[in-house]
Every structure is written in structure tokens, then in C-alpha cells.
Image (cartoon, rainbow, N blue to C red):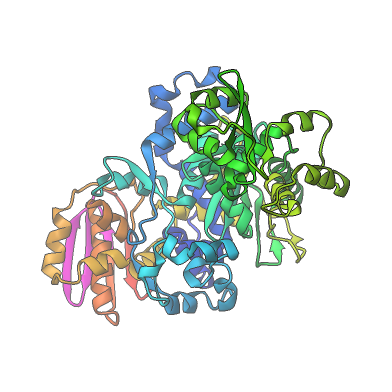
Amino acid sequence: MNRPTIPTVPADRLEEISSAYTLSDMEIFVFPSLLYPLVLANLMSPAIWKWRDDPWFANFPKLTPYRRILRLKQYVMDHYAFNLDLDTWGLTTQEREMARFAPYIAPETIAKSNALFGYEGDKFYFDLDIRRHFGLDKYTRDVIPYWKTETVEAMDAFRYKPGHENQGAGECVSLSTLYAAALYVLCGIPLDDIFLVATPLHSQNFVDVNDGILTNNRRLVTKAMWFNGTELSTKARRALEHEQVTIVAHQTGWVHAVYPEASIDHAAYGRFQNKLRAFLKTPVTSEILFNFLRQNPARQKCFQIEHACCGKRRWIPAEDAYAFENSCPYKVSDRTRDKLLDEMDEDDFFAEPLTDRIPLNKFDEFFKQGHIDLDSEEDRQRLAREVNCYRSNACEIIKELRAFCHLEPRWPDAGQPRQFVRGPSIDLKPGMTREEIIAALEAVRAENPVADLAFHAYRDLARVDPRPYFKAAIERSPVCVEEAKTMDAPMVVACLREMADESIYDSTRAAQPDEVWNARRGDGFEKAVTLAAVLHARKPDISFTLKAAGETATLTFDGKEYAFASKKGLTLDLSWPI
């Protein structure tokens, strides 16, 4: 089959398109057009399609979409770890990155929205000390780590790194894009039902199945889980509770908190908002009240639980009962409460009601008497009269309960209306083969920038102008530069030759230098590019060339030639400066 003519990247888009190869957190914020192409690159990759051969997925046709998603979750849990080791992709500086992005976005805008440039979130994150929480405190305010998003191949390559025990890994954006592609390939979920949701410190997906599902790193969160008050759910709620949604990406386009134009289909975005709003809201019941208390230990001290113990009425502090949940399969909040209390020691209970504590049991009957609408002042007052705790203002508890039951996200278009300018959509129907997906994307890439960017994120140098790949490799490979700094050039060459002669990418797709260095393996072409990155960092004013022809890749740098055997079959003639 004859491939279409490879488009040449215009000079004014080199920065954006080269960022499709490094995909750092800050690059995706500045260029939101980069987020969805990684989903498409993972769809084109053979790696996820190979999962279908695993016996774990053998009976998928017999399962409902929801059951398939749960099985997929377990596969991801078993094969990938969450990794936020800030040293994985090396260091850069605020000054350098601000200068890079100055032509595209104001520095103060980045600082308000990105943790690496000063963003620390609202009061929750100040209390948490976000820089210490994420390990940023070991860096100065100027020296910052890259937070790079990994392709599925780069995630799989973590198994070659010490300490990963043959398991892949990735950070939150990597896992969200992995999930999005796998939901399509394995579970048959239409891309139209998958929305990527990014906040300054997190990335997750909303999947329009049943009541909705949120992916959260390796895990999934259903609506019931969102409101169960457990530690896992509390962590899952953090981003939407405490951060603004900065990007929503979809097969039809994206909307961004900063840019005035949005390319996402307005109707699809409205459907997403309505579905997510419904997911984040629940009527208050006795079970929801008890779940709320599970998430708020400080409020547990206002309550007690009555229980029949050895035929006698006894009372126990609510916090003692909640603490006992950790040692048994039963819950305070559901029908297993009596079983939980039965397992507790008799001397944990008091013979008389505790002074100034509200008996939780009464709410079982209270909520049976009628629906409570927390948006109604009259209903809130009615509930507040039942919460007559001397320890705190009942209105404060009701306010907190209402926030628990009804979260309104901070949408990217809140307070500043967006102009929705619909671009060409990516229309990939469920059931398409990998080959059909690649052909469909290739057919529209000339008029669809997202499809074109997907081929760069896919790394196939036979299908793209290779200069953006080369620019990213030479300018943004701090790991190999730092770890080779004590080696002279012959030692660097020897080190590269000792690495396994195999690429983490198939066919004519190529790894970036730091992927080669981290995985300790690469094709000869990739090793030549890695050597170029190291030598350029030492002599940035030297012009050089790198040629790939047949079975050899040759770097010519400062009058010396370095040849490496290559199996990529690429024919390239690259020069620096570009």
C-alpha cells in the first residue's frame, strides 16, 4: 500500500509537535492538543492488542461491559504500578521551561495551574504541603523534575528498571491514556463515551457506562464507591474536590481552562457535564450519613451507637466502632452493623448513654420518614434539629454533609464562556481492528491535527517528519546527560554498546534517549541518537549529522564518526541545528 506523502512540520509548530515525543505535564498543559494523541498512539500500538491473547480476557464476549471493565482493572492492577519517582525523567529548570513556553502562554498563567511552577492548590493542599507530599521539596524552586507521560511501551519498559520486579509502571496521565485505549480495545467501550479529565495535579477518565466510572490511577471508582467514605475513595475525590478541571479531552476535541476557544463538540461536552454532575451527587440516607462520618473522623466524636449486648442495651462511641471496621469485613454503615458490633468486646461498651452524643441509630428511622433534600433550607433545618451535638454547630455538620453528597466541579469554562469551534472528529467505531484504526487515522491526518499528532506520539519515524523527534531527543534528555557526565566519549560509546540491542518499540518506531538509558536497551539508531544528546550537552555549539541507511546508523560529531548496527530499516539524514 502506498502511504500518503509525509507532511513537513512548519517551523512555528516544531515546539508543539516535538512535545508529542516527551509529553511532560507542563507540555500537555501548554499544548492541550497533545493529550488525546497519546490515546490514539496507544490504540495503534500492538502492545495493548496483545492483551487480548491473555487467558484473563478469554470469556470477555460473555460479560457485560461493566464486568469487562472490572476485569480490565484487575489486569492493570496486576501488571502496572503507579510511579511518581521524580528522578525517572530527570531535571530541568523553571527558567528554561518558562522561556520555552513564553510565546504560547503567560508565565503567571502557568504558575497558577502547574505544581512545578508554583501551584499548590487551595487550602487542602497548603495543609497537605503539596511540595513535600509529591517530593518536590528536595528541589529548589528553580530546579524542577520532568513529569513525563509514558506511552504503553515506555510503561512496559519499567520492568527493566531495578525495583520494578518485572512490572510496568506509569504516572497518572500515562495510566489514564492507557485505560482509555484498553477500554476501547478490550472492553468495546466507544471512544465517544470516554472523557479524559485533567486537573493541575491529576489526570483521570470519566467513562459513560451505567452510572459512570472514574479511572483513578490503576483503580476504578464507581458512584457507590465515590460516596462510601473509605480512605481509597477519599483520595480519589481529592482532585475534583480541591482543584479546577483544566482540560477535558474527547474524540471530538478539547476544552481548556485558559484558552478561549474549545474544539470539543458542544453537545458531547454538555453530556459529559450532565453525566459527571449526576455521578457526583447522591440523596442523603442513613447509609450516606454513616459513610460521611467514616470520611470525617473528627465528626464521629459527636455520635454514639446503641446495641443490644447480652440482652442488655449498651452504647459505644462511634469512633470506636469505625476503628473496628479495619479488623473485620463488616461496616457501621450497612446491614452488617450488628455483626460488627457483635464481634467487639463487651467491655468496649458503656452501660449508659454517653452524655451529649447523638445516637446514630435514630437516623435509620428518621430517613424512612421522608426524603431529605439538602438543597432545601427547610429540609436542612429539619435534619439539623436531629444533629443536636454540643461539640459543634449542627449547621456546620450539615454543610459538610451537603458538600459530601453534592460536588459541583470547577469546570474549565466556568466564569469565562468558551467559543466552541468544532474541529474534525476522530470517528473510530468499536470493533475496528488495529490496522483499520491506523488506516483511518492516516486518511484524515492532513485535515485533522490530532490525528497527525498521534503519529508523532506513536513514534513511527517512517510516517512522520523526523525533525520533531530529533529536537525532543537532543534538547530534552537530561537522564542520559546526567548519568554519563563522568564518562568520556569512548566510555559513553562502550556503555551504549554493552546495552541490549533491542528497542522497546517495534518496527520503525524509535525510543527517546532517556527511554534507552532507563531501559538499558535500544536499537543502534536509538543508541546513536542517545550519544548525540550526550555529546551535544557537552559541546552545544557544534553542528553534527546523524544518518540512518540500511543496517547502519552513523553519528558524525566534531570530526569523528560513531557507527551502530541498526535493525530499524530507516533511511534518514538528520542534521543539527535543525
Q: Position of residue 304 (x, y in %)?
A: 63, 38
- In this image, 27 relative to 535: left or right? right
Give the quadrant of residue 33. Answer: bottom right
* Residue 134 visible in the shown view: yes
Up-down relation of residue 222 to residue 16 (above or below): above
In the foreground, 330 or 486: 330
**Residue extending farthest bottom:** 541
- In this image, 528 relative to 283: left or right? left
Residue 558 is covered by the magenta coloring:
yes
Up-down relation of residue 263 to residue 275 (above or below): below
Residue name at image x 34 percent, y 43 percent: 168
In the foreground, 387 or 255: 387
Residue name at image x 60 percent, y 73 percent: 109
**Residue extending farthest front:** 351
Residue 540 is covered by the magenta coloring:
no
Q: Position of residue 8 (x, y in %)?
A: 49, 63
Residue name at image x 16 percent, y 73 percent: 560
Tell how many labels: 0
Up-down relation of residue 144 to residue 528 (above or below): below
Up-down relation of residue 254 to residue 11 (above or below): above
In the foreground, 370 or 39: 370
- In this image, 333 relative to 483: left or right? right
Q: Which quarter of the rendered picture does the C terminus lie within?
A: bottom left
**Residue extending farthest right:** 378
Q: Position of residue 553 (x, y in %)?
A: 23, 59
* Residue 438 visible in the shown view: no
Please tell me whether the stretch drawn in magenta is mainly helix, strand or loop: strand
Q: Position of residue 554 (x, y in %)?
A: 22, 63
In the foreground, 325 or 472: 325
Boundaries of the magenta span: 547-566
